[in-house]
Amino acid sequence: MTHLTQKSQVTIPKQVRVALGLGPGDDVDFSVENGKAVLIKKPKKIPFDKWTGYLGQGKTDDFMKEIR
């Protein structure tokens, strides 16, 4: 059993962390369904995803010629 701290924090039990593959730095989300709290692991973002499409649809070689 886990208790709520004075700062409204809880420790996620090891068996739940292992089952969800949770580790330090992972993002989680909470929702309430039928009066129960649901913990959802958010997918990790790949650092380069934010740059996808940034340079347009051209080929790398064409882009390199253009910037030289």
Image (cartoon, rainbow, N blue to C red):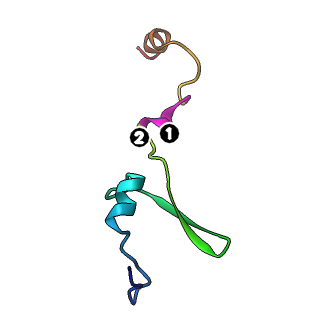
* Placement of the N terminus among the 4 image quadrants: bottom left
Q: Which disc, if any, is residue 50? A: 1
| Relative depth, front residue between 1 and 17 | 1
Q: Which residues are magenta?
A: 48-53
Q: Is residue 22 visible?
A: no
| Secondary structure, magenta segment, majority class | helix
31 displayed left or right of 62: right
The relative height of residue 61 versus residue 31 in the rendered view (above or below) is above
Q: Is residue 63 visible?
A: yes
Mark 2: amino acid? Pro
**Residue drawn at point x = 32 percent, y = 64 percent:** 14
Mark 1: amino acid? Lys
The relative height of residue 31 versus residue 57 in the rendered view (above or below) is below
The relative height of residue 13 versus residue 66 in the rendered view (above or below) is below
Residue 65, percent across and down?
Answer: 44, 9
Q: Residues within 10 Å of mark 2 (few under 14, many from 20)?
A: few
Whole-angstrom CA distance, mark 2 to mark 1, is 7 Å
Residue 9, percent across and down?
Answer: 41, 79
State the image quarter where residue 36 is shown: bottom right
Question: Is disc 1 placed on a helix, strand or loop?
Answer: helix
**Location of mark 2 (residue):** 47
Q: Which disc, if any, is residue 64? A: none
